[in-house]
Amino acid sequence: MHKLPFDTVLIANRGEIATRIIKTLRTLGLRSAIAYHEVDAQTPAVSMADLAIPITGRTPIASYLDIAQIIAAAHRANAGALHPGYGLLAENAEFARTVTRAGIAFIGPAPETIELMGDKIRARNFVQSNGFPVAPCAIEEDDPATFVARAWAIGAPLLVKPSGGGGGKGMRIVHDLDALEVAIEQARGEAHRYFGDSRLYVERYIESPRHIEVQVLGDSFGNLVHLFERECSVQRRFQKIIEESPSPALSPELRTQICETAVGIARAANYQNAGTVEFIFSGREFYFLEMNTRLQVEHPVTEMITGVDLIAEQVYAAAGRELALSQSDIASNGHAIELRLYAEAPERGYVPTIGKVLLLEYPDNVRIDSGITQGQNITPAFDPMLAKIIVHSPSRIEAALKAYRAVRELVLLGCETNASLLARVLSDEAFLDGQFHTGYLEENPHLAAGNFAAGMSAFLASAALLTRPVRESADAVPALHAALGSWRN
């Protein structure tokens, strides 16, 4: 194998994805460098990296978004390449362009591709113009004055979406058209706060849809392949919780059709490196949703069923190598499930949680992609995802059972997590039958609530009995009974 044109890679990210990248860099014989804020000083990624370079900012997140500091850190590390991970600057076209101008290989697609496919409105128009299926839609900037009228013409239900968004931020479902204008204003405000881009569009909302995405890989020689699909329909507030592959919803014919459509879209965009084409699936038809021009959080399930190291393939593509894989080389074997472990309390409306990790024990015989360690403080400064538990088995039912056992064996004390919710979903009949959709958790609120009320009552009763006044009252013998002395019947 030819030597790579760089020997050091700067990781412009943090948490579990940073540790994941470092592991692959080690297998490739490459040095890893990481830029980090002081709040992450004791994290596994910083201790694992060959070189750790501190960066500062008004807030921790601001430091990771400071392009000038990131480039300076790359130069300090003599890094010939930079991996953006996901989130943060991963889909920032100007960042990718700045990295390239600095003489550093960007491990991702070209800036022009990020601009095209990262902007949901441009991407949708591009996909439609190339003959691929998209849901009926009205785009505000086409004619702002008629935007509401055009949305009305599509008919309810509608989904209001920001052009530059992600992670469900700014999205609104509208079932009553009389509420459309309020939803638009709310979405616009939230989009501006999160993305600095208030442009909106409205599309037909597919009731009870499945969320299915396809992993693609491309190189600079025009080669493009898919690595099958992932089912991502178990979500809360448009945020994924459980992903799996293959999807239990697709027939072999539909699987071929949706995967070939994804490759066609990527080919039309001259896509290079790793990317994901996302679709909404109605049970009969599928529509283009968006393309993520980066590695996905859920990429491990694809790695488990195909045996392909996606980060290694990203590095090779950025190094200018031709894909060593043809479509016929890629096979799907068995079934994989990924569980996202979040610092949040589903029983209390999914509120974020914080605390010090007092004890941390992961289950054996499963893959763990983790960004935390025992003794670490979990703060509200970043996304609440702590780790991912990934399992692989010959069948879906076996994978679900293995995942259930794994999450039940997990021990994390000091910070509330969604582990109990994950266990309840994995043992739910609808999930085991594959009969779920993106509104599954909303339709089954008992899965989030669990037996929280009963558990809290028992907890409060136990706590009360530990307090001196309550305990003394409970142990006290009434005067009438005390007068009987030691007499027994």
Image: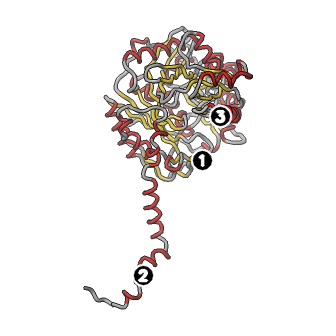
Name the residue that disc number 3 marks.
183
Q: Earlier in the sequence, mark 3 or mark 1?
A: 3
Task: Specify the amino acid type for callout 1.
Answer: Thr
Residue at (52% x, 20% y) in the render: 277
Task: Residue under label 2, please give it.
Answer: 476
Q: Is residue 445 above or below residue 302?
A: below
Tag 1–tag 2 contact (CB < 8 Å): no
Q: Distance between the residues labelled 1 and 2?
A: 45 Å
Residue under numbered circle 1: 379
Q: Is 213 on the left or on the right of 96, as rendered?
A: left
Three-letter amino acid code at disc 3?
Answer: Ala
Mark 3 to mark 1 CA distance (whole Å):
31 Å
- Judged from the image, the secondary structure of the residue bearing numbered disc 3 is helix
Position of residue 20 measured from the top left corner of the image (x, y, whole percent): 50, 32
Question: Which of 348 and 115 lies nearest the eye of the viewer?
Answer: 348
Q: Which of marks 1 and 2 is in front?
A: 2
Of marks 3 and 1, the one in the foreground: 3
C-alpha separation, residue under disc 2 versus residue under disc 3 = 60 Å
Residue drawn where x is 50% and y is 29% of the image: 207
Above or below for 154 versus 446: above
Asked which quadrant contains residue 168, the reply is top right
The correct choice, above or below, for 337 with respect to 294 in the image is below
Image quadrant in which the C terminus is located: bottom left
* Label 2 vs 3, first from the N-terminus: 3
Residue extending farthest right: 145
Using the rendered image of the protein, determine whether residue 38 is visible from the camera's viewpoint: yes
- Within the image, what quadrant is residue 424 found in? top left
Q: Is residue 33 visible?
A: no
Residue 394 placement: quadrant = top left
In contact (CB < 8 Å): disc 3 and disc 1:
no
